[in-house]
Image (tube, rainbow, N blue to C red):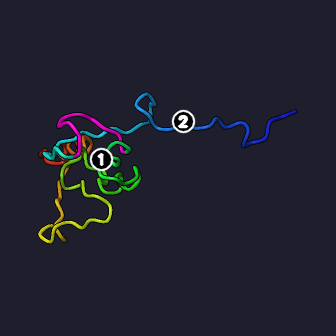
Amino acid sequence: MRARKFEMKPTPHAPSKHHPNTTFKKWVGDRTDLGLVKGETYTWTEFGAAVGIVASSMRGRVRGAKEVSDCHMWKAGERKPRAEWGVTNITRCETDADKLSQKYLRMSL
């Protein structure tokens, strides 16, 4: 008897430090009350647990930045300080591919 489609697929593993598809980001913030060590890498789950939110919300806050800093870490239900409302930190060429592309685009022909 042949297995059905849903029986053929393996069950995905929960993210852990030993799973190859787990994303790690480097912590570069100065806050010490979160229990994170500056310069160490953490998963979305560990960052989310530090501020009391789920991993998918933490991933949405960071939105592709290479490193996680203090500006990404606020607790659920809290608001950012009024001074930070509407302020966006735009970093140009933040991925390695962007930097390499800009290197060759700036060369004279």
Image quarter in which the N terminus is found: top right
Q: Which residue bears the numbered disc 1?
A: 50
- Bounds of the magenta segment: 34-44
Q: Position of residue 108 (x, y in %)?
A: 12, 46
Q: Is residue 42 magenta?
A: yes
- 67 or 54, which lies in front? 54
Residue 109 visible at all: no
Disc 1 or disc 2, which is closer to the eye? 1
Q: Of label 1 and label 2, which has the lower sequence position?
A: 2
Q: Main secondary structure of the magenta part?
A: loop
What SS does tag 1 mark? Answer: helix
Q: Which residue bears the numbered disc 2?
A: 13
Q: Horizontal placement of 96 versus 108: left or right?
A: right
Which amino acid type is shown beneath numbered disc 1?
A: Ala
Quadrant housing residue 89? bottom left
Which amino acid type is shown beneath numbered disc 2?
A: His
Q: Residue furthest right?
A: 1
